[in-house]
Amino acid sequence: MPIYTAPTQDLQFVLQTVLDVAGSDTPGYDELDADTTAAVLEEAGKLSANVLAPLNPVGDEQGCTLENGVVRTPDGFKAAYDEMRAGGWMGLDADPEFGGQGMPYVLNCAVGEMFVSANMAFNMYQGLTHGAYSAIHAHGSADQKATYLPNMIDGIWSGTMNLTEPQCGTDLGLIRTKAEPQDDGSYRISGTKIWISAGEHDMSENIIHLVLARTPGAPEGVKGISLFIVPKFLVNEDGSLGARNALSCGGLEKKMGIHGNATCVMNYDGATGFLVGELNKGMRAMFTMMNEARIGVGLQGYAQGVVAYQNAAAFAQDRLQGRDVTGPANPEGPADPIIVHPDVRRNLMHQKSFVEGARAFALWGATLIDRAHRSGDAEAQGLISLLTPVIKGFLTDKGFETTVLAQQTLGGSGFTRDWGLEQFVRDARITMIYEGTNGVQSLDLVGRKLPAEGGKPVMAFFEMIKTFVKENEDDAALKQGFLDPLKAASKDLQAAAMYFMQNGMKTPANALAGSYDFLHLFGHVCLGFMWARMAKAAQAQLDAGVGDTAFLQAKLVTGRYYMARQLPATALHRARIESGGDTVMALDAANF
């Protein structure tokens, strides 16, 4: 049986010491004092460890079942869902006007990491609802908000996003689902959507589907797509549930992982739908949900790495195999714990340095979202727009890699189901695929985000790192172990960006062939920046004689590992980028 311990101490360190949320002038952050965040994290941690984590293997073993159009979730899921509802966790950062608690998004992300680590498949039900809530909140009419949002925030109703169809995934311009206008202002929605997470289940009274469809005579491609609210049950004027809508679950996908989440084929047979926002502007509305989902998927990626690492570290402390090369560490026993071996240490340090750096990166990104939304800060908006594909792509690639490394730590035990590592590997794998594959994220980064606003956001990022290095270069310990490697990595990133500027327009393949390496190069620089900030914060507390000395010293040691052993990968990615696209494109398609 796998273990899970909520990392509340590290979450609190990142929020309060590194990001200094309590001292921020972002509206609403005055509520994020240390006592408040500690209390929220502690309660969420208990729920994660005691309620959600024990259900994770149950959901994996049982999966969901479809009987006569009804999807049954695994044993215990409904009771856990009701407990989440009762605690108000589904509305933690939602608008108080509609029943939410109005807390900043960054706190929701910190809590969300624990929920995902404990039970990723379960958390997807409320995660999809949150995304649907955000889209309606941003683009819905006053009546739509009043009708749907209170019950979605409460969790009585849940939500989904319906984009993909059998013939189209990334290329949404190929959508065939139709929306026929009716005399009463509603639409009749007809078509089939696939891979719809939480599309049908038994935990909420109603499911509010957000469906992309095309109206008659709409322009071709994405310019002719509109977004519609299509509830499972129609809602009467008094707010009560009315007739069952003409939609159904046509099947459940048989998946590699996330078995506890119902991934559905959804059939719409003239279902009643209601336009969200403007006609033919559905992509703009849906991307409110998609961008939030991409941040959430990045969080999923590293959160699976967190729980996998915890199990690997615990195993390495207990498993006896071989002897320490410097002499027996456990002379009274038949062998030493495998954590004494340098290669096991390397493996664990790789995992630990990634998940802790990723946590800081994701929460920093969440503060940028808060600043953009709550303050109208255009620079924060530009920066998080630039970083979104990096958060999604890099953290999921490396999160999956971390689960594999953790599995490797257990040796043969990691390949068996009893220990749980193989489930973490299978569950983490989807994060690299859905909400836009990581290859698509890299193309978005290089093709759209890098040149956005004439390159202003990326130049602001470079300036941020340059300023941080300059302000702290008199600190000899920080300079040698953290600032010098960060400066070198940042130069690799700038050189790669310059290569794209010089070669991308005349030879697009040169840029696109290097886009994936650029995403990883950028991700490493972001984690290097986070580790430099964490090192500064940890050393300051040590110098002041405050905080947990062992925790702070471990933070410094782990950070030095990342800067010395992982961050130099930027040079490799830069070399690949600067090799151009010729070797990538040279082989004729028929010869693959």
Image (cartoon, grey):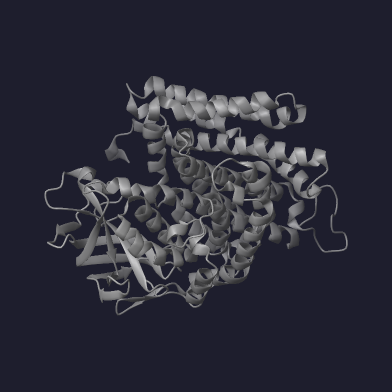
Front in this rendered view, residue 299 or 40 = 40
Residue visible at 84% across and 64% down in the picture: 333
Q: Is residue 541 left or right of residue 309?
A: right
Does 445 sit above or below residue 197?
above
Picture coordinates of residue 462, whole percent (x, y): 54, 27
For this orientation, the residue located farthest to the bottom is: 68
For this orientation, the residue located farthest to the top is: 502
Q: Is residue 36 left or right of residue 117?
A: right
Does 155 sit above or below residue 350?
below
Picture coordinates of residue 426, whole percent (x, y): 49, 60
User: On the rendered image, what quadrant is the N terminus found in?
Assistant: bottom right
Residue visible at 37% across and 42% down in the picture: 440
Residue visible at 20% across and 61% down in the picture: 191
Front in this rendered view, residue 472 or 40 = 40
Picture coordinates of residue 453, whole percent (x, y): 39, 28
Picture coordinates of residue 394, whole percent (x, y): 50, 43
Q: Is residue 257 visible?
A: no
